[in-house]
Image (cartoon, coloured by chain):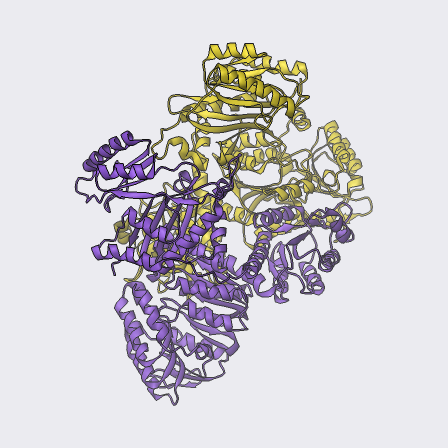
Chain colours: A purple, B yellow
Amino acid sequence: MADRKETLQRAAVKQPGLASLFNPQALAVIGASANPEKVGYKVMYNLVQNGFPNRLYPINPHTAEILGYRCYRSVLEVPEELDLAIIAVPAPIVPQVMEECGRRGTRFLVILASGFAEVGRIAEERELVEITRRYGMRFLGPNIFGIYYAPTKMNATFGPTEILPGKIALITQSGALGIALTGKTIMEEIGLVAIASVGNKADLDEVELLEFFAADPQARTIIIYLEGTRRGRELLQLARQVVREKPIIAIKAGRSQKGARAAASHTGALAGSDAVFSAGFEQAGILRAPDPDEAFNWARALASQPLPAGRNTVIITNGGGVGVLATDAAEEQGIYLLDDLPLLERLFREAAPEFGSLKNPIDLTGMATPNEYRLALRGALEEERLHAIIILYCMGAEQIPRDFAQAIIEEYDGTKPLVVAMLGGAETVEAVKLLNRAGIAAYDEPEEAVRALAALYRWKDYRDRPLPRGEPELEVDWAGIEAVLKGAWTEGRLQFLEPEVKEILQLLGLEVPEYRVAHSLKEALQAGEELGYPLVLKIISEQILHKTEAGGIRLNLRGERDLRGAYQEMLAAVGRSYPRAPLRGVLVTKFITGGVEAIVGASRDPSFGPTVMFGLGGIYVEVLKDVVFRVAPLSHQEAREMIGKIRSAALLRGIRGELRKDIEALAEALYRIAALVARFPEISELDINPLRVMPEGEGCLVLDARMTISEVR
Amino acid sequence: MADRKETLQRAAVKQPGLASLFNPQALAVIGASANPEKVGYKVMYNLVQNGFPNRLYPINPHTAEILGYRCYRSVLEVPEELDLAIIAVPAPIVPQVMEECGRRGTRFLVILASGFAEVGRIAEERELVEITRRYGMRFLGPNIFGIYYAPTKMNATFGPTEILPGKIALITQSGALGIALTGKTIMEEIGLVAIASVGNKADLDEVELLEFFAADPQARTIIIYLEGTRRGRELLQLARQVVREKPIIAIKAGRSQKGARAAASHTGALAGSDAVFSAGFEQAGILRAPDPDEAFNWARALASQPLPAGRNTVIITNGGGVGVLATDAAEEQGIYLLDDLPLLERLFREAAPEFGSLKNPIDLTGMATPNEYRLALRGALEEERLHAIIILYCMGAEQIPRDFAQAIIEEYDGTKPLVVAMLGGAETVEAVKLLNRAGIAAYDEPEEAVRALAALYRWKDYRDRPLPRGEPELEVDWAGIEAVLKGAWTEGRLQFLEPEVKEILQLLGLEVPEYRVAHSLKEALQAGEELGYPLVLKIISEQILHKTEAGGIRLNLRGERDLRGAYQEMLAAVGRSYPRAPLRGVLVTKFITGGVEAIVGASRDPSFGPTVMFGLGGIYVEVLKDVVFRVAPLSHQEAREMIGKIRSAALLRGIRGELRKDIEALAEALYRIAALVARFPEISELDINPLRVMPEGEGCLVLDARMTISEVR
């Protein structure tokens, strides 16, 4: 909750926008150094070397000049207010320097030093925040390697010097990885528009940076390396809008259990469930890449290629083997290879020799020269029923790959997405670079090209998704629900009783089979008479969570005699298994048969807040782990899609002659449960197990439910 | 069957061994050329350039000398018998040239030309085989790029010239891909001991080459690129032995449906089911790589690293972010990161600064110098409870990656597997090369390093697997089974009747609930009396495969009255749905309840012959595709493991209070079914659905079964 409150406070600070951070007119480097071994030298060097055009003030009390710039003893001596100060001094001196920045008047700070929250020094990090609050400053860091922005020629990092300007913005939580990845972009000629190292995110975080890059026309694709986030909900909300304009690729490390633990000990990041990250990314339309290499491969295509107008893809190759490899990858990635054979025959007959294959992959054979590639590409570009093109090339004997690349570059008109893979050796690596420089997404492996095109298609699907319409206001007695919640609060209980949960769910509009709470055998028998047999008996106690194991549940009681026996046996059994549990009565309810059992859960994720979970009962959730998560609230559309995501969804649609189940009612239930937990985030866990989904038209029924809140108001 | 017969014939030809193919004393290049544009020049050039040390005879009627070698007008003029002739003439001239080779006396041919079976010219390819049979020659190809063998300095390919000698043998079905991959190995400094391009495999194929490399001490790891095989069973049988000595990595293209089709149209390869390829590879212990890059990455580690003595692995890093990425990959790959914190603390305290993490990943932090890496590596090498090491390095500001690589090389003693990933730019790429040259498996990405180590572990697991013991001879009345099979043969039927299949399965030793075949209501009633109720009635007709849809099955008949009604209704229903089907009576059998329904199938795969399939009934096979395949026959051990491979296996072990099912009986049934189809390969399909697996100790029961044979003897 501390994070939540902090967020609110932070939002209250007047936001000056991040323009001065990326385009500072006056920039100081505090701890600038003339000693090439020092970080403070490297930052100055990178700034100077990249031709930073605005006013630059190195600060160092012991030096007169650094790299031709006059050096100041303190930031207080600088003759103007600063837009940005890069703080390159060790952790212990940082607070003092920050104070001076505040007094001098400084808008943004970039705090490089490590040795704060990531090594457990929480108080030291909090102090940084407090200082900036006092002076109305904002900052990046600590524990970062700097900031880079191509349009203002600002390389204020201690990473690589000659970053290639381009269209990809990189936000990275890891500094070391950020430096290494930047080095890789240089080697592979991937152009970057910006790098923001966010590190411990004590103040500015990925959400605010994403907001800046979203509005920056120079950034065409955004890559975020993330280990955890405190503002998952804001991130998703913002991303949902951004992806309509430009793609976001996330590399979320810590997807395994041990990985998450390693991430936590790395930046002290509060890592939410990885499954919820995946779910949230999908809801928001963020592309999740498995690793940094893949992210940059995707970004190459996303930042350079137009969107396809449809799904028909063609593979043009000079090698059958790579054609097969690419076909495998295409099918796995859901890329559709057009198989209109007469059309393909007409388009590519001229380019392929008689013994080539025209079945897609179009095999021009090893005899193909640049001219055959040219002809084939022309055919593919001209045909409007083809929407995307994959070109593969295997270097043959005595061939000059550069010539093939050149032919492709000359022929390509930019009207359709084109990805290319060239395999061979040093010569094809050079040819791939030629293609990339010409704005064609090119790779060393067929699978890389195919997966990059698939990412482009996924982004298109996200863009084309209808925006959630404004859902009609739910007609729910929220006050009534709050009253039930308060009932437990007033008792100081965190664990709710089954009748309480059922009452809440009933008020929420879910269907609950009729029930009574009995406090004696007599009351139970009377309830039986009112409800009609067969019945179920369940013990009510906040301390008995596993009723079956405690002997606290009796099913299918067919008459008074059954009920009488079961009541007494149950109380005896519970007395043995939980001799000290407070018993709050016995729940008497109808015994329901038919339908399929679902499990619907809700829990509060540390990163994303309220989430809902859905799966089918029995072995599906427990053994097959066939579950789907979503961040709450949901639109109706999302609730319906959620149901389709489980592998066992066919059970609901009715297989092997069984009736279709009431999927609409189930979707409505998910929608309402998501609304409930979004409205009352103090609900830390809700578990409806089972929710019986009846045949179509017969709704779905809450048979049992548990709920916990995390705090008492 | 044509393939099968050919294989037998081939085996009958006297096998001279492949020594002369890889180490020819006298070698002719037919179609050698002085024109650098020709394949015949390139092969000569590569041979000469690589310093082929033995007698070399270029053959070309129009040239006197090529690259300093005297040229002969015809192979007939060569002054000695040839070990090997590389045939570099166009397809139409190949047969004539082969005849001459035969007449001159030649052991092996390498036929480069394409334009044979891969473009549908089957007869032309058959002719090549016939010529070589006449002269007792063997050959590689056609449709290949040649052969390379490092120990004899023989580069008889038209691919790259300067192949790096090493320990990896490559067998490739695709020529173009083979050339490209060879180029890549040069660029990435991956050493090859041999390349055999097998192309259309008209004669020599991957099995015989594997046999050669298995016996060749210079080959430490074998990579096979495969699109299909005609000799799957021989391949597996051989591989099972080979992997005890050296790892085999297969890249099997055509794993998707469209990919398989593309593969088929590429080399005319008869592609078996991809799932069966995976199953067979696993049974034999072949490592299946998803793509060529991954295969070579694995091979690097497999060819250079010792096997780990146990499962405890440590990650040493200077960047938390890459540590997390590697941890994710390790968990996904089943690599165990030791978490004995006191031990780790003791081993690495000295190497890491106070604020570094010692929790594995060991984070030496960005401040680590080569010396800290040295200390950490030393600690990891010395501790006997650590069995494998992953070192990660992110290039930091002002660091010289080469120095880090050097420190690792100096410290590493070769006693434990070590994989390294260095991230950065051109400098780390150079450092990675340094490491690889020193025999340490190094990569550009943490995931690559982790997956390579995982491949090493998988190979170790395959090696350590107990060899299937000689299974006791099954006491089965095979003659009785053959008699039932003949019963259908004599009628010229391919489809068996349910009572026939049940009789076969009973003779095989499977349990079948008692049944009678009735030909009238009277006989049915009498059967009912003998068997006792409840009963099931089923129509018997070879034309009615889907009894339920045809109304040809009635369940749970509780007495004579039920039986009487069901009999008449069923015959009426079948009469309506299949008015012309021959009815061969009515099967009367016990109605069985309880247990779990399994589906056991067997079919004949075009590549691997008889296979068995297993899954659970209901939605598990049909919707969740939760099935496992195995190539028959099985050992008992394999049958047991097969059951554990399905995701829903927990249902058999008993979950949620249910009894454990009779898994032993199920394994025995699988074992026997595999033995049946292995013995009678004419069984093209067998489908036991359901096989009811009863609670432990109660066996499993064949409730329904169908069978088809592919030919009548």
Answer whether residue B553 is visible to the viewer in this image.
yes
Q: In x, y percent, where is residue A284?
A: 48, 60
Say left or right for A552 vs A450.
left
Which residue is drawn at the image coordinates 40% and 35% (left, top)? Answer: B650
Residue B391 vertical position relative to residue B120 in the rendered view, above or below: below
Which is more toward the observer, A295 or B503?
Answer: B503
Q: In x, y percent, where is residue B458?
A: 45, 40
Answer whether residue B470 is visible to the viewer in this image.
no
Which is more toward the observer, B627 or A570?
Answer: A570
The N terminus of chain A: image quadrant: bottom left
Q: Residue furthest bottom?
A: A79
Q: Residue furthest left?
A: A580
Residue B104 vertical position relative to residue A392 in the rendered view, above or below: above
Which is more toward the observer, A569 or B197?
Answer: A569
Q: In x, y percent, where is residue A72?
A: 36, 86
The C terminus of chain A: image quadrant: bottom left
Which is more toward the observer, A390 or B706?
Answer: B706
Toward which corner of the image does residue A196 lie, by quadrant? bottom left
State how many labels appear: 0
Q: In x, y percent, where is residue B219?
A: 53, 40
Say left or right for B236 vs B204.
left
Residue A293 vertical position relative to residue B545 in the rendered view, above or below: below
